Amino acid sequence: MAPRTVELLGFDRDARVLVVNADDFGMSGGVNRAVIEAFDRGVVTSCSLLTVCPGTGAALDVLAERPDVPFGVHLTLVSESPTRRWSAAASDVGSLHDGAGFLRAQTDRDGLLARARLDEVEREMRAQLAVVLERGLQPTHLDWHCLADGGRADITGLTLDLAVEFGLAARMWLPTRRRAATARGLPVVDHDFLDSFSLDTTTKTHVYRAGVRALRPGLTEWAVHPGSDDEVSRAEDPQWRVRHSDLVALTDPSLRETMQSEGITLADHRAARQVWVGAAAAVPHPETGLS
């Protein structure tokens, strides 16, 4: 019987362990405030930092002041939308650009993946990592914004190579790659991710509480997206209702009470990082193993 990830992390096989990771830290001031509030007052245990956004600098300042907040690097090759465009961190990455010199909008993911040169993808990924490392900060993991496992097998392989090189875990989203990673003793989630963008904004607290009760033994992860409902957020983010409903639900005391009554263990990616570092030699390239 193959071990569950919770066993690789030192828990009993039947433990119900949950990571609540707030994606998109650094996207904007409103998102930054909400992520920290959901960490301090709610059940968020970890976050993932975008390094090419208007709120990146302020988020880095927070992380420098708050070493208790575990975070990963939320790699991105796409802008949020045609009206919320971000510049690449690296120079000379023309295959990643739209016609105006910005990262392509996520609505053009297929166009990006058809044109992106792997050497330029690597240059951009390293530049985004450097934004964090040059501040002397230690991330726990790598993951992707709007591209499941990087969107292409060779990009997934590059992500794993960089995770090994920099001593980080990698959040693996797709079931086939998760199974392959687990078979090689690498800790990834045992069950499908929950993406908060898939949930109804009006019933989210109820859905989260029901989800806690339904958690199965093993490691589960929720990818959540807390945000604010201030005037600026409403004006600049068409998805502000999704994000603010996350903040409300994640900070609802009844959610933590349900987790406690169900015996759920909350975790982040620090323990997984240690196992990934120890098993680095066992990580194959996805085109030969994790594809």
Image (tube, rainbow, N blue to C red):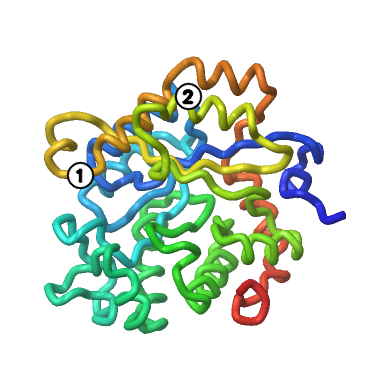
The quadrant of the picture occupied by the N terminus is bottom right
Residue 186: percent from left, percent from top = 70, 59
Q: Residue at x 32, y 55 (%)?
A: 51
Task: Indicate left or right for 129 with 186 as reference.
Answer: left
Q: Which residue is mark 2?
A: 206
Circle 2: is it few (<14), some (14-19), or many (20+) Cα within 10 Å? few
Residue 199: percent from left, percent from top = 41, 39
Q: Residue at x 52, y 37 (%)?
A: 20
Query: Where is 284 relative to 50, above or below?
Result: below
Could you give the CA–CA distance between mark 1 and mark 2, rounded to whole angstroms? 24 Å
Residue 40: percent from left, percent from top = 43, 25
Residue 6: percent from left, percent from top = 73, 44
Instruction: Look at label 1 and name its amino acid.
Output: Pro
The quadrant of the picture occupied by the C terminus is bottom right
Circle 1: is it few (<14), some (14-19), or many (20+) Cα within 10 Å? few
Q: Earlier in the sequence, mark 1 or mark 2?
A: 2
Instruction: Look at label 2 and name its amino acid.
Output: His
Question: From this viewpoint, is residue 209 visible?
Answer: yes
Query: Where is 81 relative to 236, above or below?
Result: below
Query: Residue 88: which quarter of the image?
Result: bottom left
Task: Indicate left or right for 186 with 12 as reference.
Answer: left
Q: Which residue is mark 1?
A: 238
Q: Residue at x 38, y 44 (%)?
A: 197
Q: Nearer the viewer, residue 109 or 145?
A: 109
Number of dots carrying numbers: 2
- Residue that sits furthest to the right in the current view: 1
Question: From this viewpoint, is residue 40 visible?
Answer: no
Task: Indicate left or right for 156 with 280 as reference.
Answer: left
Q: Residue at x 30, y 64 (%)?
A: 78
SS at mark 1 in the image: loop
SS at mark 2 in the image: helix
